[in-house]
Image (spheres, rainbow, N blue to C red):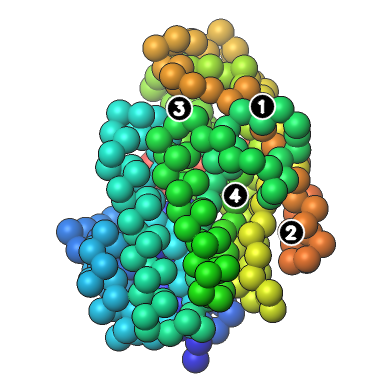
Amino acid sequence: MKKAIITGITGQDGAYLAKKLLNEGFEVIGFVSNNSMSNDRFNLRYLGIIDEIRYCGVDLTNKDDVMAIVEKERPHQIYNLAAQSSVAKSFSNPGETLAFNFNSVINILESVLAVDKTIRFYQASSSEMFGKVKNLPVKIEHPLNPISPYAVSKVAAHHTVKSYRTAYGLYAVSGVLFNHESYLRSPNFFCKKIIRQGIEIANGKRDVLELGNIEVKRDFGYGPDYVDAMYKMLQQIEPRDYIISSGESISLKEIVYQVFDLLGISHDKIVINPELYRPEEIEDIYGDNTLAKRLLGWNYNKDFFSVLRLLIDEELKNSKEIEHK
């Protein structure tokens, strides 16, 4: 049986990826931090796979710790999804963001190099790496211009993966994923926040939704489909990096209005707070998914308004089930 390691397995992508790999016949090992072995694993429980995974406590910033477990487990594939992934938090704590997001990647790659160079490695890169792009859509060869500490950390990791691929011949690739949402998204992410708080407003539990700059535009897609692209990237003959995106952008304002319209909420419940603006902001960005569709056979064609309806329906269903318990 093939064996795969997933770091960040308790997150949205980690949970969906674990389910995908289990369905493909893999034994799945989830790396969790040593000080959070009893962490909330809601996402894995929600997908019904919590007991099908073997968990290992690992400090990804400790090279010896990572090396020992890779040596013991000898996986066929490693998917590195663990990161300090909040852009806002990276501005308030840049050192921690840079240290974890870079050192964890180095330690895994060094372990692969020392233990077994045939291990295939996937790195979760981010569209934030491109910064303010003049010529859209973004292609994989676009220059990287990070404007947040989080993006800087992802650029460093991205270049490192490419370096190990070219210098040592490792099958090491980066998936540059644009925004992708699901019911399992953390509450601090935009779509999850507005859906949950919108439902609270509709139920009379909240008065308004307070937001920052909603004039900006982003490329949004559906999380489970993006995870399929991750898996496909490690099944190819030749390793290469890909952009995984919907191929179009939509303004945050359009998303908020659509959610409020679907929930029957007046737009005057939206309050813009300039204090929530980021120090630097990308006005518009969307990716070119042509390469992923052509070479990976990744057939993504969902309209994001239909995705929003899926997310709202799932949120409403689960909130009602919680109320009935």
Res 188 visible: no
Instruction: For mark 2, give the secondary structure.
Output: helix
Residue type (three-letter) at the residue carrying disc 1? Asp
Q: Earlier in the sequence, mark 1 or mark 4?
A: 4
Tell me where residue 266 sits by quadrant.
top right
Q: Is residue 71 above or below residue 214?
A: below
Q: Earlier in the sequence, mark 3 or mark 4?
A: 4
Mark 3 highlights which residue? Answer: 197
Q: Which label sits on residue 292?
A: 2
Residue type (three-letter) at the residue carrying disc 2? Ala
Residue type (three-letter) at the residue carrying disc 4? Leu
At label 2, counting other C-alpha atoms closer than 10 Å, the crowd grade (few under 14, some 14-19, many 20 or more) is: many
Mark 1 highlights which residue? Answer: 284
Instruction: For mark 1, give the secondary structure.
Output: loop
Front disc: 2 or 3? 2
Tell me where residue 319 sits by quadrant.
top left
Instruction: For mark 4, give the secondary structure.
Output: strand
Q: Residue furthest front?
A: 167
Q: Is 300 placed left or right of 61 in the picture?
A: right
Residue at x 75%, y 50% (from the top left corner)? 289
Residue at x 71%, y 33% (from the top left corner)? 249
